[in-house]
Image (spheres, grey):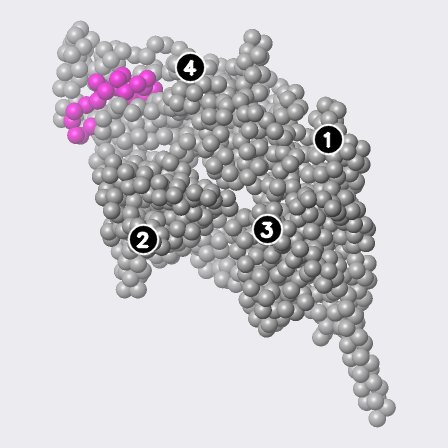
Amino acid sequence: MRFGILGPLRVGGGESTVTAGRDRTVLAMLLLRAGRLVPVDELVDAVWEDHPPATARAQLQTCVSRLRRRFTELGLAPELIVTDPAGYGLRTAPNDLDAEVFNRRVEAARAQVVAGRLAEARTEFRAALALWRGPTLSGIASRSVHRRAQALDEQRLTTLEECVDVELRLGQAAELIEELAESVDRNPLRERLRGQLMLALSSVGRQADALAVYREGRRTYAEELGIEPGAELQKLHQRVLAGDLALAGRPAPPVGAVRSLPRAIGDFIGRQETVARLVKEIEEDGIRIQVVDGMPGSGKTTLAVHVATALADRYPDAQLFIDLHGHSERRPLTTATAVAALLRQLGVPAERVPENLDDRLALWRIELAGRRALVVLDNAASADQVAPLLPNGAQSLVLITSRRRLIGVDEGRPSSLPVLDADEAIELLGRVAGMERIAAEPEAAAEVARRCGHLPLAIRLAGARLAHRPRWRVADLAERLVAGAGPLAELTAGQRSVGQAFALSYAQVSPSAQRLFPLLGLYPPGRFDSRVAAALVDLPLADTQEQLDELVDAHLVEEVQPGRYRLHDLLREYARLLLAGPERQAERHAAVERLLDHHLSVTLAIARTVEAAGSRRNIPERAPGRPDLLAVPVAEGRAWFEENHVALTALVRKAEDEGFHVQCWQLARACWRLNFEGGHLDELIETHTIGLRVAERLGDEAAYATMLNYLSSAYFRLARFPEAISAMEVALTVRRRLGLRDDTLSTLWNLGVSYAANGDHRLGKTKFDEALAMIRGSVDVHALTNLLNNVSYALIAWGRYDESLRLARLHLLAARQAKDDRQTDNAIGHLAMVRHRMGDLGPARRLLRTALYLKRRANNRFGEGEVLNEIGVMERVAGAPERAAALHREALVAMVDSGDRIGQCASRNLLARAMLEQGDAVSALDLHRRVLADASRLAARYEKARALEGIARCVLATDPTTARAHLEQALALFREVESPDRHEVEALLTDLGRRIICESATGAAGWYA
């Protein structure tokens, strides 16, 4: 295959790719629609999104020219890219593109299923799935590419589900459990996968685990979507409860005999998949050299001995083991010493071992010739150390372990050993410290395992400490790992310690890598890229990359995906200790400052691209310390922020702790819009609360007011309106006193919409009027668009549609004049909503469709949910409650993503109304009651009133008295907030009163007669 999009972009059939960002986006778009023309406008939109330059078409031609040159370099015909007046296309042969091969394989598999040939279908399905190297076109940040790539990722999941169905029918449930568990963890809302995991678990007799999977799913659906699992999953749950799916488990395979190998430990835990893969590669694929590498303490030697023991019967002539001391307090064994020791293990007398190295190696090969021998070369220092020791015979097996990646071992099949998973770590702790003791304190045991980073050596040492201190609770050890001298001081037993294991590896990397490693410990837990490392160490990017590669090879740093790195928790603690001495404090302080400067510079640059013109004016100006490191992360934009938002929050905390107060509040401000629109409201509140503290310490009143203003936005989205109003009133007072006209304006219109959302439309109007008075006569079109945006929205909620329509039209004109895409999108959305409320359905429908497209293009999840709900109401009123319910469910997901609590209440209320009109009064009633509880807790009067009205509609036919009571409560609330919904409730109450009178009259007449 010459092109690969099922993972990172690949060109030319190997690992080659295209590196220029725009060229990658263009090629990705052409490959996503291979064989078809892609219009120029679509390519321009994909490359530049909302801000195409005037020279976009000319630059696009340059991109295509560069791609053709790159094709020539890779041996591809440049004519594969087709130029047409309408756009560009890419011609591919049947086997050129992995996505097309994937589709053909899937179709072949489905045909085999139809024909009843399940084994052949499984082979085709697995061949198709094996083509995937990761998420489609990962690493390309374009929204257009991402939208189309999502469709392919969805096809992969569907194919996996179909493949699992076949494999379950073939009786392969046990082999599927781990893969299904990982897939469900990554896709928790996917019911079919969850059902398949339940079926697999039940099929091997693990009914309790299957039921736990269902309970977890039910909790997730309730918390995330507010709904119950689907009918099929519920039926499967009943079958599991009834025991219909249980099968007897298979007996464990026998363990091979141990001969001259070290004793295999009796508490070997986990690694089943790795062991099974290694054994399969040796037994079935004929691999004769296996190289196991991993970080210090990851259990490489234990694994190698376990595999060797399992295979010992296949190598009855000799089973040898030698510690090469590649990473120990002793010097690594020389080749001469190592081969002499191996010859002695084979029984060669000392007097027969030659003095000359070449003669020793010749004798070694002669002794192994014809033998079925297994050799474990443990703790290797380098490929050069082990290469002379490799036997020639095809009947021998060599298992090599090392803390370094041994790239130069010919024919070696590498395996990097990760840490244990959480359950395996807890089980290992129990095996060492005592299972009953661990079972009695499960939460503390999980905390100990987590503090040990799930590293086998650390777990064993922690367990040994518990075993030798029977009076300790597990919680006592967990507390000591958090407090006291730190985890590395606690994780020692005799001559063994985790810190010592790390020190041996650290001592063997180059001085430049030794300088970088401790600085990496300053970065918060999580992934970082080479630019972060370059900023920390203050070296050119290319030099830093070389040092990172060296640390990765030494397993002191993990490369979790191409270009993304992280430190194990205990290695981070070790790095911290290396910088703890007073002689390194100046170095540490300077590195923290560079770290903050890099992230602040990137985030400020991205903020200027995503924020509206009005709010961009108070984004701090700052000259970056390393401008050479900014281009890539700034180009990634939102994608970079989403990947790093947890670290950015931690860096705000670090800035406060380290005394970088200006950087602290500025970083909080730079992250505001991205946190707000991304639904990261907890992070927004935390960062701005910290920013508020440091601004007060600095005595910077303007910064203090800025933090209050943006802190209130999170309170608003969480429906904490009184807190939002209180914060903004203080900000307003400060900004007026400082004479900050623009900031005063923004606070006034934010206050206006907050008062309106809290049901006080008249007080909100006074704030809007005050802002309008300040703007009147001004040429500040950006301020006008912001004000009109908030006023028109508030008037819709107030039911003053004529005024709202007039202002929304003015808003649209002003936004276009200001060339503000965000405000243009908002204006179209408001126009659509008000036209719908006024009954202009044709124009409203067209505007709503446009608004939905614009909100999605801008990644505005709240706005998307709002428009989906509006369209859903239109569909329900038009007599299509099924379509309405689907739209409201989609809106609910968007509102959950945005973090907007009121939006979630609104979506659930509207979903319940649609469900009621589908005839499902029971589910609708449950959903309205949930909203009633949520809205009451939030003091959200409007949604509480809608929930009360909804409950009344659900019981109207069966319990008119209860319905009337709920309607009266709803009416009182609607009147409090001056909502136009009160008119519909008044009409309902009038009709209900007439009905009750008629029923009473009919009953009385019957009695009299």
**Circle 4: element type:** helix
**Circle 3: element type:** helix
Residue annotated with mark 1: 702
Residue annotated with mark 4: 512
Residue 386 sits inside the magenta stretch: yes
Mark 1 vs 3: CB contact within 8 A: no
Residue 516 sits inside the magenta stretch: no
Q: Amino acid at mark 4?
A: Ser
Sequence-wise first label, 3 or 4: 4
Q: Amino acid at mark 3?
A: Arg
Mark 4 vs 1: CB contact within 8 A: no
Q: Quadrant of residue 734?
A: top right
Residue annotated with mark 2: 84
Sequence-wise first label, 4 or 2: 2
Task: Tell me if 248 is positioned left or right of 860 in this view.
Answer: left
Which callout, 3 or 4, points to the residue nearer the camera? 3
Task: Give the distance between the C-alpha atoms of the residues marked 4 and 2, in whole angstroms.
Answer: 53 Å
Look at the picture and state if 435 lies above or below 170: above
Mark 1 vs 2: CB contact within 8 A: no
Which callout, 4 or 1, points to the residue nearer the camera? 1
Residue at position x 58%, y 47% from top? 819
